[in-house]
Image (cartoon, helix red, strand yellow):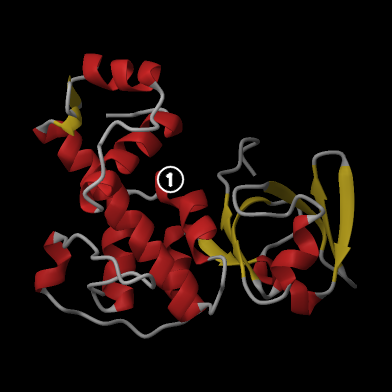
Amino acid sequence: MKMERELEDVIEEIWKKREKKEVPAMGIDPEKLEQLKKMGLIIVSEGGAYLTEKGEEIARSLVRRHRLWEVFFHDVLGMKEFNEMAGSVEHDTAGNIEESLCDFLGHPQQCPDGKPIPRGLCCGRRIRKRAGWGFFHHMGMTRLCDVSKGKKVKVICLRGKIFSKLAGYGIVPGAIVEVIETFPGFVIRIGQSEIALDRESCSDILVQILQDTNGS
């Protein structure tokens, strides 16, 4: 089921409120609750909003993806903004990527905040991969410095101090940029702006290469 991100956020919020033993519907937009009710994902009563079996499945997957990405951004990349970064990519994480990420991280049981990560079918295998950027190549992800001229990419994450440096230019997780020059330095286009970057900065930006639309 394909849902709007705002509705996915509400489903996830209901799960988290229950986890914290809070009133499930408190502070949530009634219109969004009504939409989810019509979709058969929640039941609304005087005591709040409760997930149906279908809603539970979706919420569980969203929470699992979010917390796995939190572990990645915190433990692998050493980022302080792990929660925000996880929120920017969780909605676009397909099931096979979720499983590969869990394998890669060694099937963690908790996120950096100590909250439990829902288990997946892959967790019974207990496989641990070697950490490194190369792990993400098969998912169409790579460092910006390895992208060829003319390619469009989606920014997945920025590690280290580069995050605060480039955020002002709009280079944040989810941004779409085009590589317009790679030598002698990198030049990228975001919107109507062109920005020059040194190779060291580009090596700290993880991106997903977008499918060509011109057949090249």
Q: Residue 156, relative to residue 129: is it above or below? A: above
Image point (38%, 16%), residue name: 31
Taking the spot 45% from the left edge, 68% from the top edge, the residue there is 136
- Residue 144 drawn at (x, y percent): 67, 66
Residue to which mark 1 is pinned? 92
144 relative position to 107: left or right = right
Tell me where residue 215 appears, x and y as whole percent: 61, 39
Quarter of the image where the N terminus is located: top left
User: Please, what is the three-letter code of the amino acid marked with disc 1?
Assistant: Asp
Which of the two residues, 97 or 79, is positioned nearer the viewer here?
79
**Could you say where residue 62 lies in the image, as x and y percent from the top left?**
31, 47
- From the viewer's side, name the closer residue of 137 and 194: 194
Q: How many marks?
A: 1
Q: Is residue 13 above or below residue 148?
A: above
Label 1: state its secondary structure.
helix
Q: How far from the left and from the top, in percent, is residue 83?
A: 48, 60
On screen, residue 153 versus residue 25, left or right, reads right
The answer to whether residue 84 is left or right of residue 179 is left
Indicate whether 50 appears above or below 30: below
Q: Residue at x 36, y 85 (%)?
A: 130
Answer with the quarter of the image where residue 43 lies.
Answer: top left
Residue at figure coordinates x 34%, y 67% from the top left: 101
- Label 1 crowding class (10 Å Cα cut-off): few <14, some 14-19, many 20+? few
Quarter placement of the C terminus:
top right
Q: Residue furthest bottom?
A: 130
